[in-house]
C-alpha cells in the first residue's frame, strides 16, 4: 500500500492510494489522527483501510504533495554507504556507518521545487532509499531489525557541497532550505518483496547520473538499524536515509551541479519516482 501526505483545503492531511491507483483516501479527514507519523506510532496502518474503505476522496492526479513524513522526530542520513561513492570521494571504509542529521524544515515534497541558494553554485543531487521506522526500540539486533520497519520511500539528499566541506561536519551543507526531496509516498514493506532488489536511478534533465541496487550498500538496512539504535532510541516515523550510490555531480569531470531550470528525478523500483524542479532562491 502507498501512504502519502498532501495539502487539501489549505491544510496538510494524509492517506493512501486507492487500489485502482487513481485516487486518494483522505484518512486525515476521516479519523482523529493528524499526521501519518501518528498513525504509524499507533500501529494503525493495517486497520485503517478497512475502516476508511477504497472510495477516493480526491484524484491522485494533480494532488499537491507534502513530504511523506511531515513531522519525523529524527531524520538520520547515512553517508558513504556505496563502495562506488566511497571510491569517487576518497572517503569512507571505516567499518561503521557515517551518520549525520537532516531536519524536517529542510524538506520539500514531490513536484515541489528544490531551491538553489544564492550563496553557492554547488547544489548536488544524491538519490537515496528512505527507510521509515514503524516500531521503536533501542539496541535492536540485526535479526529483529526489519520487524521495526514499516516501509520505504525515496529521498534526494540535496547537498550544498561548499558548505558541506567547510569543516569535517556535514550539517550546514545538508540543511539549506528546501533541498531535501522526500516523496511521493511510502510503500509498505510487504509490497516491496526482496529489499535487496530495489533499484535506484537518478536522472538530471533525463540523463542517468546514478544507478545501483540496494544490494550494493556497504551497510545494509539491518545493520543501519542495529547501529543507530545502539546510541539513540528509534521512534515510529523516524526516517533513515540510507546513502547515495556513485555518480554524484561533485565527483564528475567537470563537476555537474543542479542549476535553475533543471529537473531532477529519483526513481526507486518498485516504489515510484520523486521529481523536483530546481529553482534559484531569490
Image (tube, rainbow, N blue to C red):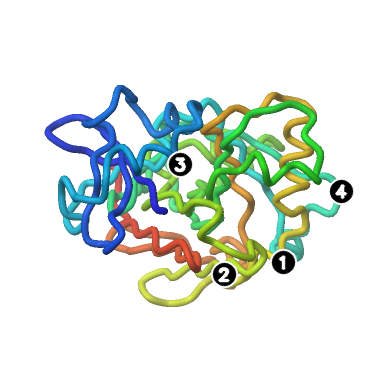
Location of the C terminus by quadrant is top left
Q: Residue at x 21, y 46 (%)?
A: 64
Q: Residue at x 41, y 39 (%)?
A: 107
Where is mark 2, residue-wise? 199
Distance between mark 2 and mark 4 Cα atoms: 25 Å
Where is mark 4, residue-wise? 94
Q: Mark 3 or mark 1, which has the lower sequence index?
A: 3
Q: Mark 2 or mark 4, which has the lower sequence index?
A: 4
Q: Residue at x 71, y 55 (%)?
A: 81
Distance between mark 2 and mark 3 Cα atoms: 26 Å
Pinpoint residue 178: horizontal percent, then vertical percent. 37, 40
- Which numbered tag is attached to residue 66? none
Q: Secondary structure at mark 2?
A: strand
Depth check: 134 or 208 in front? 134
Q: Mark 1 or mark 2, which has the lower sequence index?
A: 2
Pinpoint residue 138: horizontal percent, then vertical percent. 74, 26
Depth check, mark 1 against mark 4: the one in front is 1
Distance between mark 3 and mark 1 Cα atoms: 31 Å
Where is mark 3, residue-wise? 46
Crowding near the residue tagged with mark 3, few <14, some 14–19, many ≥20 C-alpha atoms within 10 Å: few
Disc 1 + disc 2, Cβ < 8 Å: no
Q: Secondary structure at mark 4?
A: loop
Crowding near the residue tagged with mark 1, few <14, some 14–19, many ≥20 C-alpha atoms within 10 Å: some
Where is mark 1, residue-wise? 216
- In the displayed structure, 51 sits above or below 138; it is below
Amino acid at each position: 500500500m502507498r501512504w502519502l501526505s498532501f495539502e487539501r483545503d489549505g491544510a496538510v492531511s494524509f492517506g493512501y492510494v486507492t487500489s485502482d491507483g487513481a485516487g486518494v483516501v483522505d484518512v486525515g479527514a476521516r479519523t482523529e489522527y493528524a499526521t501519518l507519523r501518528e498513525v504509524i506510532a499507533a500501529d494503525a496502518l493495517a486497520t485503517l483501510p478497512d475502516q476508511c474503505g477504497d472510495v477516493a476522496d480526491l484524484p491522485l492526479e494533480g494532488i499537491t504533495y507534502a513530504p511523506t513524513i511531515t513531522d519525523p522526530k529524527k531524520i538520520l542520513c547515512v553517508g558513504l554507504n556505496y563502495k562506488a561513492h566511497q571510491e569517487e570521494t576518497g572517503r569512507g571504509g571505516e567499518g561503521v556507518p557515517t551518520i549525520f542529521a537532516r531536519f524536517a524544515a529542510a524538506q520539500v515534497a514531490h513536484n515541489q521545487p528544490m531551491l538553489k541558494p544564492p550563496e553557492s553554485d554547488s547544489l548536488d543531487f544524491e538519490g537515496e532509499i528512505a527507510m521509515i521506522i514503524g516500531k521503536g526500540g533501542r539496541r535492536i539486533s540485526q535479526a529483529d531489525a526489519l520487524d521495526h520497519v514499516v516501509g520505504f520511500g525515496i529521498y534526494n539528499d540535496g547537498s550544498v557541497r561548499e558548505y558541506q566541506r567547510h569543516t569535517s561536519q556535514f550539517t550546514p551543507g545538508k540543511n539549506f532550505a528546501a533541498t531535501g526531496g522526500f516523496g511521493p509516498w511510502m510503500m509498505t514493506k510487504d509490497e516491496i518483496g526482496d529489499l535487496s532488489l530495489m533499484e535506484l536511478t537518478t536522472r538530471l534533465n533525463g540523463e542517468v547520473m546514478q544507478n545501483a541496487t540496494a544490494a550494493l550498500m556497504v551497510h545494509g538496512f539491518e545493520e543501519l538499524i542495529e547501529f543507530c539504535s545502539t546510541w539513540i532510541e528509534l521512534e515510529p516515523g523516524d526516517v533513515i536515509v540510507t546513502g547515495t550510490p556513485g555518480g554524484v555531480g561533485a565527483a564528475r569531470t567537470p563537476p555537474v551541479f543542479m542549476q535553475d531550470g533543471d529537473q531532477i528525478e529519483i526513481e526507486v523500483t518498485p516504489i515510484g519516482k520523486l521529481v523536483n524542479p530546481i529553482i534559484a532562491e531569490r
